[in-house]
């Protein structure tokens, strides 16, 4: 290890607390410092190259250091880096809002900015709640929310209340508000014989929850088509349409969280486009800037927006805002990213890549310890099991998913697991050759590690 890395390692170990990281383990290892990026590759301080297999936490879209995005940020930097949206506005935030509305599904006409996925969800939550309190003919009893049991919407207390991943959320339970919970239609781990039955069961519980409680329910939050952090759980066909129909039937808001799925990740600009869904509120973040800078948005309909209009002393204002709301640099980056979608024909070119990826993944199911492979567009989860028949996991102390991802680094790939699920979510700009490299490295890493730790 050269002196510079030695020094940085000492500084990192002494001063930095990393997210979602057991720091006791962290400080016993030498961290990998990523110094540069080049297209779909990350380059460390020794000049070693790794394919960015999870788009730098599901954010990068067109590759790293794209000149068009860099230039847009630099151009904006020369004008102004930050000014406030409270009482003032700025050019990129205004231009971007129009572009977002043009591509957004259904009747989403208004854009409220924030700076990360969790805040975009907090905003959706408060907006939905306040809407019922002050719309024309208000229904003040509508104060609660429905969520799917294994949801993930971020790490702030409101979004944690809407989440259900025990490992992340249990410790905070006394701080959280109650929700109505319905089962995730997770076919692989269900007792059902068909995906349809699994889906119908979840919809049946949703219907009965709504029949009994719709007067108390403001809205339903859902990650559309695929639950990401829960382990890449892909919903059965028709499920999302069923959920939307029930929300409409029982007069509750249909709120979709496209933080992970938005901006092409599922093969369409938004996952909702698959069935032309029309959410009342939609949250986006991660890929909005091409994965370059922090920015998020909560989009909603005229109907919801109008419920916040009135005389100042009516106090119908949406009293919410963050310092960096609508940051001009981030918005300039987002505009450049949306222009690249057109220039590169990003969505059109995805079809071939998704099919290729799917064909590469199929043979992996023959491996002894791969229980299930779930794919939605460019989002993939490979579930590792200790026994295919029982679908049991490896003992938690082995940390099989973590070991596989560490092994992948030896084969020039950076990936990060969700427990025992190996996640692949490369930038949309990945090439066919790079997909081949990714899958070869992942297959080999799974083989090596499961052979070592399997029965
Ligand atoms: C569906 C979904 N919603 C919200 C979030 C939270 O986003 P952020 O990490 O930007 O707060 C995530 C992050 O993974 C997510 O997958």
Image: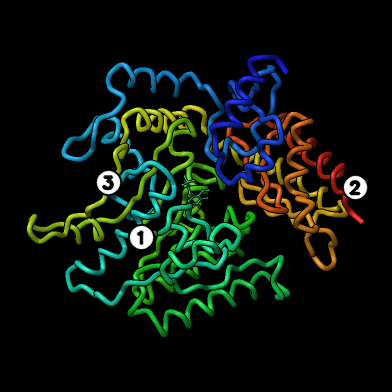
What percent of the width, then of the height, locates residue 267?
56, 45
Of marks 1 and 3, which one's residue comes earlier in the chain? Answer: 1
Describe the element under mark 1 as helix, strand or loop: helix
* Residue that badge 1 annotates: 125
Number of the label disc, if any, that sits on residue 451 = 2
Q: How was the colour assigned to the protein in this rendering? A: rainbow
Give neighbour class at mark 1: few <14, some 14-19, many 20+ (Cα, 10 Å).
Answer: many
Q: Residue furthest bottom?
A: 212
Judge: label 1 CB < 8 Å from ligand 1.
no
- Residue at 48% x, 69% y: name it: 243
Of marks 2 and 1, which one's residue comes earlier in the chain? Answer: 1
Residue 23 is left or right of residue 269, and the answer is right
Question: In which quadrant is the N terminus drawn?
Answer: top right
Q: Quick one: 146 or 32, which is closer to the camera?
A: 32
Give neighbour class at mark 2: few <14, some 14-19, many 20+ (Cα, 10 Å).
Answer: few
- Residue at 79% x, 37% y: name it: 407
What percent of the width, then of the height, locates residue 338?
42, 33
Describe the element under mark 2 as helix, strand or loop: helix
Does 65 sit above or below residue 390?
above
Measure how far apart labels 1 and 3 are at the Cα level.
14 Å
Question: In which quadrant is the C terminus drawn?
Answer: bottom right
Q: Tell me if I can see residue 148 in this picture.
A: yes
Measure how far apart labels 2 and 3 are at the Cα level.
52 Å
* Residue that badge 3 annotates: 321
Residue 211 is left or right of residue 85, and the answer is right
What percent of the width, then of the height, locates residue 116?
42, 43
Does 70 sit above or below residue 185?
above
Of marks 2 and 3, which one's residue comes earlier in the chain? Answer: 3
Give neighbour class at mark 3: few <14, some 14-19, many 20+ (Cα, 10 Å).
Answer: some
């Amino acid at each position: 290890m050269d002196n510079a890395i030695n020094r940085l390692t000492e500084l990192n170990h002494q001063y930095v607390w990393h997210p979602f990281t057991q720091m006791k383990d962290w400080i016993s290892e030498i961290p990998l410092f990523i110094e540069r990026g080049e297209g779909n590759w990350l380059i460390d301080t020794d000049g070693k190259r790794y394919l960015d297999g999870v788009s730098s936490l599901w954010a990068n879209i067109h590759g790293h250091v794209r000149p068009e995005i860099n230039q847009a940020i630099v151009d904006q930097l020369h004008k102004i880096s930050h000014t406030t949206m409270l009482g003032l506005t700025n050019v990129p935030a205004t231009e971007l809002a129009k572009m977002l509305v043009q591509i957004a599904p259904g009747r989403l006409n208004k854009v409220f900015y924030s700076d990360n996925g969790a805040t975009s969800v907090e905003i959706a939550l408060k907006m939905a709640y306040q809407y019922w309190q002050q719309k024309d003919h208000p229904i003040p009893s509508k104060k609660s929310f429905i969520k799917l049991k294994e949801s993930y919407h971020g790490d702030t207390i409101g979004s944690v209340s809407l989440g259900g991943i025990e490992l992340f959320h249990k410790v905070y339970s006394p701080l959280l508000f109650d929700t109505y919970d319905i089962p995730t239609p997770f076919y692989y781990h269900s007792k059902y014989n068909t995906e349809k039955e699994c889906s119908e069961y979840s919809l049946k519980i949703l219907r009965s929850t709504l029949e009994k409680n719709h007067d108390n329910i403001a809205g339903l939050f859902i990650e559309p088509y695929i639950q990401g952090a829960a382990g890449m759980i892909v919903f059965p066909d028709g499920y999302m349409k069923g959920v939307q129909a029930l929300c409409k039937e029982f007069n509750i808001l249909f709120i979709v969280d496209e933080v992970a799925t938005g901006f092409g990740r599922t093969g369409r600009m938004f996952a909702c486009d698959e069935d032309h869904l029309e959410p009342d509120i939609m949250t986006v973040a991660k890929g909005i800037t091409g994965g370059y800078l922090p920015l998020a948005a909560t989009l909603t309909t005229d109907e919801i927006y109008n419920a916040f209009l009135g005389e100042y002393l009516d106090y119908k204002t949406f009293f919410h805002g963050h310092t960096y709301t609508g940051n001009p640099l981030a918005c300039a980056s987002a505009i450049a990213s949306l222009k690249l979608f057109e220039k590169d024909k990003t969505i059109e070119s995805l079809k071939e890549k998704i099919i290729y990826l799917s064909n590469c993944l199929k043979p992996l199911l023959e491996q002894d310890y791969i229980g299930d492979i779930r794919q939605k567009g460019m989002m993939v989860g490979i579930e590792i099991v200790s026994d295919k028949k029982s679908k049991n996991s490896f003992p938690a102390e082995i940390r099989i998913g973590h070991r596989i991802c560490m092994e992948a680094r030896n084969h020039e790939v950076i990936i990060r697991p969700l427990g025992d699920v190996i996640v692949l979510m490369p930038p949309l700009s990945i090439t066919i050759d790079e997909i081949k490299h990714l899958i070869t490295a992942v297959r080999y890493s799974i083989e090596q590690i499961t052979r070592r730790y399997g029965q």
